[in-house]
Amino acid sequence: MSDFIVKEVSNDIVDELERIGFDSSYKNVACNKYEYKNFKIFSLSLAQANILKQTALSFGADCAVHKDTVIGKVEKTDCIIGGSISQLKKIAEALKKQPFSLKKIADLILSKLDIKLESMNIKGHVFDYSRPYIVGILNLTANSFSDGGLYLDFEAAKNMFDKLVLDGADIIDIGAESTKPFAEEVDTDTQLKYLLPILEYIKTYNISVPISIDTRNAKVAKEVLKQGADIINDVSGLSFDSDMARVVADYGAKVIIQHTKGTPENMQVNPKYENLIDDVYKSLNDSIQFAQDKGVKFENIIADVGIGFGKKQEDNIQLIRRCNDFKTLGVPLMYGTSRKSFLNVKSNDNNLKDSLSLAVNSILANNGINFLRVHNVKLHRQMLLLKIFNH
C-alpha cells in the first residue's frame, strides 16, 4: 500500500488553500499561480507570433503557433497561449515593451484575464449574475415549434403571461414572429396587433417583471420600446434591419444579440462552418462592435450563440459543450435550448421536451451561463432552488 495519497483539486482553490493552513494574507495572490487559462489569438504576423512565443517561454508558459512560422512559409498564424494567471500577467507586462503593436495584444490579454460583468438594472430589478436567470417565453405566433397558435387570443396570452410571472420568470420574452426553420417574415402591423395589447395590459397593471420583445423589425422595436418594453431580442444579430441598432441606442434599451447563419427561410439548408466555435465567436464579436459603433452601450448587450439558428445537431451540441469559450466576449450570455429540434423530440409531447431541455440547461447553468430562455419556467425555477451551480 502506498504511503501517500494524491487527489485532484477541482473546487475553489482559495478554499483549498485555507484548508491546508496557507497564509491567508497571501491566498488571493497565490491562487493566480494555480488557475490556468488558454487563449486563442487570431491572425498574428510572424514577428508578433515569434515574440509572443519567446516571451511565453521565458516565463515558463507556452504559445503554440503554425508549424511553418519559424521558416516563414506562412504570412499569418493563429496562436494559443496558455499558462497560469500569474504567468499570463507577467507575459502581458513584458509584451507592453515590445514593438509590432504587441502592447495592444498585452492589453487584450489582461482584459480577458479579469472579466467582471457589470450588474444590469432592468426595470428596477438588479441582475448581478450571482445565479442563472430564467427568461420565460410567450409566443404570440401561429406557427412556433411547440406552442404555435395557443396564445393568439388576448385572454389566452394574458393568462399565459400571468402564469410565467407566477412561476417566477426573471424576464418574459414575447414574440409575434416565429423564427423557426423555414418560417416566413411577419409584417410590422401583424406583429404589433398581438404585441401592443399585452404591453398595454402590463402597463395598466404596473407589472414589474422586465419585458423582452423578440423581433428583427426596427419599426416594431421602436413602437414596443415606446410602450415600455425593456429589451429587444434580435435573432439576426442586428443584421436583418439596418435601423435596429440605432433604435436600440436611441432608447437606451438592453439588447440580446444572437448569432444566426442566414435567415429563418434558409438557415437550415445544409449550414456549414469552417470552424464552428471560432466563426460564431467572431460573428458575435463583430455584431457587438457594430452595436457599439451605432451607439449601443456595451453594458446593455447580452449575447446568444443561436442554438438551432443555422446549425446542425452536432453544431448545437458543440456550442453547448464549448459555452465557456464565449465568456471572453465580456458580456452576459443567454442560451435558448428549450424544446429545440436538436433534442430529437419533435414528435413527442412537451413534458419530454421540457425534461430534456432541463437536462441541457442544468449543464449550462453549472457552467455559469447567465440567462436561460425556456418555456417551462416553473420546472427551471425548481432546479435553481437546489443551489448546486458554480455561480
Image: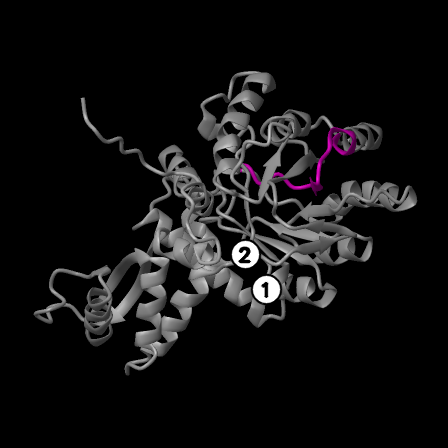
Query: Quick one: 90 or 177, which is closer to the camera?
Result: 90
For disc 2, the neighbor class at 10 Å (few under 14, some 14 to 19, many from 20) is many
Nearer the N terminus, badge 1 or badge 2? 1
110 and 60: which one is in front? 60
Three-letter residue code for mark 1: Phe
- On the image, the x and y values in percent for residue 371 come to 59, 43
- Assign the N terminus to one quadrant of the image: top left
Residue ID at (50%, 22%): 346
Q: What crowding class fits label 1: few (fewer than 14 Cα within 10 Å), some (14-19), or many (20 or more)?
A: some
Which residue appears at 63% of the width and 66% of the height? 297
Relative height, residue 318 to residue 71 (above, below): above
Disc 1 from disc 2: Cα separation: 8 Å
As drawn, the residue found furthest toward the left would be 71
> Could you say where residue 38 lies in the image, as x and y percent from the top left?
32, 54
Say which amino acid is labelled 2.
Answer: Val
Question: In this figure, which colouring scheme has been used for the structure?
Answer: one colour
Which disc, if any, is residue 264?
none
- Badge 2 element: loop
Total marks in image: 2
Q: Is residue 79 left or right of residue 327?
A: left
* The disc label shown at residue 331, or none: 2
- Looking at the image, which is closer to me, 222 or 203? 203
Question: Where is mark 1, residue-wise?
Answer: 298
The reply to whether dot 1 and dot 2 touch (C-beta < 8 Å) is: yes
Residue 209 magenta-drawn? no
Query: In this rendering, is residue 302 above or below 95?
Result: above
| Residue 9 quadrant | top left
The residue range painted magenta reads 164-182
Which residue: 55% across, 17% down? 352
